[in-house]
Amino acid sequence: MLLDPQRGYDLIGDVHGCAHSLQHLLERLGYRLHAGVWRHSRRMAVFLGDIIDRGPRIREALHLVHGMVDAGQALCLMGNHEFNALGWETSVLGAGAPRYVREHTPLHARQLQQTHEQFAAHPADWREFTQWFQQLPLFVDADRFRVVHACWDAPMIAQLKLAYPHGCIDQAFVQAAADPSSFASRVFNRLLRGTDMRLPDGLTLTGDDGYTRAHFRTKFWADAPQTYGDIVFQPDALPEHVAQRPLSVEQKQRLLQYPLDQPLLFIGHYWRRGQPAPIQANLACLDYSAVLSGKLVAYRLDQERQLDPDKFCWVEVDRPEAPL
């Protein structure tokens, strides 16, 4: 998807229902509310996905972002949380009881709980938004910069582009993801959830979010990693004996890379903490745990080909969110 090369772009990380903080951030970035839409005369916002779930003002956040997209003031990508909601609502044809792309299990219901509760009195709104989720691109390749929610897998994106050149998929593609072995399922998992690795020796870890997992999130840009600790990329640290464990040759061969000669890449998804800064000269994560009293972060992109640490902009998120 080619965007206007003369325009500046404000890449914005995971909102997760923090609508008031998003308004504060847009105001800081120079956007102003006009005719019900946040606008900037020379710039455009690009949201990295995960507008929904977890936060206190999910419906308000969706209306704000959707209004900007409708008015040509923003572009929004699909995050794994939007895909979860879309999969929950999308049925798959077959005999017997209704079957959905996202199975209606207690775990999946818990992940969508805040969103469903906040839309309980607004079912028509929710139907419209889930239809809109279907239209959100899975990636943006704008020549001099790229955007994806969690992971840029170049071979997979090249294959996806053959059928969906701008990353906007159709209902048949979503329905195909009901089969975990399908290309569609692998696309959603890789681009929207990233890469991971199984913990050794049957080990599991329970994170700060309360979920117990047998896998940990990994870097897709690691340069010559040697140990598990070299590739971990998540809020929850690995136990020291696991972090020091050497990677096998086979494990190293399965890892992705994002070389420094590639265009600027912006991702969300990873619940970072601390001072926003580049991961490497051409890679930035803009998810700084806004909904967990972290920061809602943007990067102000102009014509640069290398990330500038001074162009990160953010607002601190109070808990609960402070009103305007």
Image (cartoon, rainbow, N blue to C red):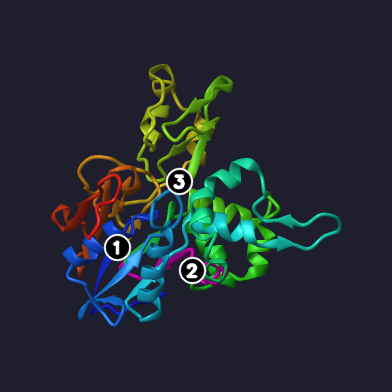
Q: With respect to residue 123, does 190 lie above or below?
A: above
* Label number found at residue 11: 1
- Residue 184 visible in this rendered orientation of the protein: no
The x, y position of residue 262, in whole percent, is 33, 58
Q: Earlier in the sequence, mark 2 or mark 3?
A: 2
Q: Are marks 2 and 3 in contact (CB under 8 Å)?
A: no
Q: Quadrant of residue 126?
A: bottom right
The x, y position of residue 61, in whole percent, is 38, 63
Q: Please give the residue where the numbered disc 3 appears in the rendered image.
A: 256
Q: Is residue 128 magenta?
A: yes
Q: Are marks 1 and 3 in contact (CB under 8 Å)?
A: no
The x, y position of residue 36, in whole percent, is 31, 78
- Residue at position x 54%, y 72% in the image: 128
Q: Is 263 left or right of 41, judged from the image as shown? A: right
Which of the two marks, 2 or 3, is nearer to us in this view? 2
Q: Please give the residue where the numbered disc 2 appears in the rendered image.
A: 136
Which range is magenta?
Answer: 127-144
Q: Nearer the viewer, residue 233 or 76?
A: 76
Residue at mark 2 to residue at mark 1: CA–CA distance: 16 Å
Q: Is residue 12 magenta?
A: no
Q: With respect to residue 63, does 86 lie above or below?
A: above
Question: Which residue ends up furthest to the front in the rendered image?
Answer: 121
Q: Secondary structure at mark 3?
A: loop
Q: Nearer the viewer, residue 316 or 8?
A: 316
